[in-house]
């Protein structure tokens, strides 16, 4: 799927931020293991949340098109720009 520069930049940014958050989560979990402080469980939970939040956020944010339905003749997609759809001709079945 070809992307214009702004959408490619948004997709790249979402992937990079997802990776950074996931790596920060791993770092937080590892740093929490070295603590013998009452905040250790909080830091561990925060690391797990950051890790999974980064993975999910990166995956969802990097999607270009989302398939919603397929039948024998048509494919329904979401997350398509309204500007792009306005250029296409009307389709009457």
Image: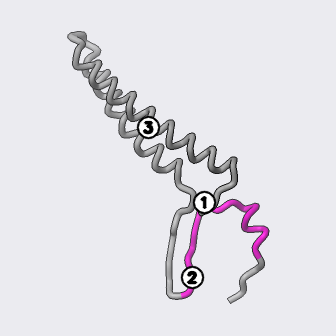
The mark closer to the camera, 3 or 1, is: 3
**Which span is picked out in magenta?**
73-88
Residue 30: within the magenta? no
Residue visible at 62% across and 49% down in the picture: 8
Residue visible at 57% across and 74% down in the picture: 76
Residue visible at 24% across and 12% down in the picture: 35
Across and down, in percent, residue 20 comes to: 45, 32
Residue 82: within the magenta? yes
Q: From mark 2 to mark 1, how far is it between C-alphas?
A: 17 Å
Q: From mark 2 to mark 3, how far is it between C-alphas?
A: 35 Å
User: Element at badge 2?
Assistant: loop
Among numbered discs 3 and 1, the one appearing first in the sequence: 3
Among numbered discs 2 and 3, the one appearing first in the sequence: 3
In front: 43, or 14?
A: 14
Q: Quadrant of residue 22?
A: top left
Q: Which residue is mark 2?
A: 74
User: Element at badge 1?
Assistant: loop
User: Element at badge 3?
Assistant: helix
Q: Which residue is mark 1?
A: 79
Across and down, in percent, residue 72 comes to: 50, 87
Left or right, 64 with reference to 81: left
Asked whether the residues under the numbered discs 3 and 1 touch, taking CB atoms below 8 Å apart as contact, a structural biologist would say no
In which quadrant is the N terminus drawn? bottom right
Q: Which residue is mark 3?
A: 19
Determine which of the numbered discs, if any, sits on residue 7 in the image: none
Q: From mark 3 to mark 1, how far is it between C-alphas?
A: 22 Å
């Amino acid at each position: 799927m070809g992307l214009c520069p702004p959408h490619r930049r948004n997709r790249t940014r979402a992937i990079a931020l997802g990776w950074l958050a996931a790596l920060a989560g791993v770092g937080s979990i590892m740093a929490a293991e070295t603590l013998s402080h009452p905040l250790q469980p909080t830091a561990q939970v925060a690391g797990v949340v950051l890790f999974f939040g980064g993975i999910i956020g990166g995956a969802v944010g990097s999607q270009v098109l989302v398939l919603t339905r397929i039948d024998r003749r048509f494919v329904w997609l979401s997350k398509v720009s309204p500007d792009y759809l306005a250029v296409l001709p009307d389709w009457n079945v």
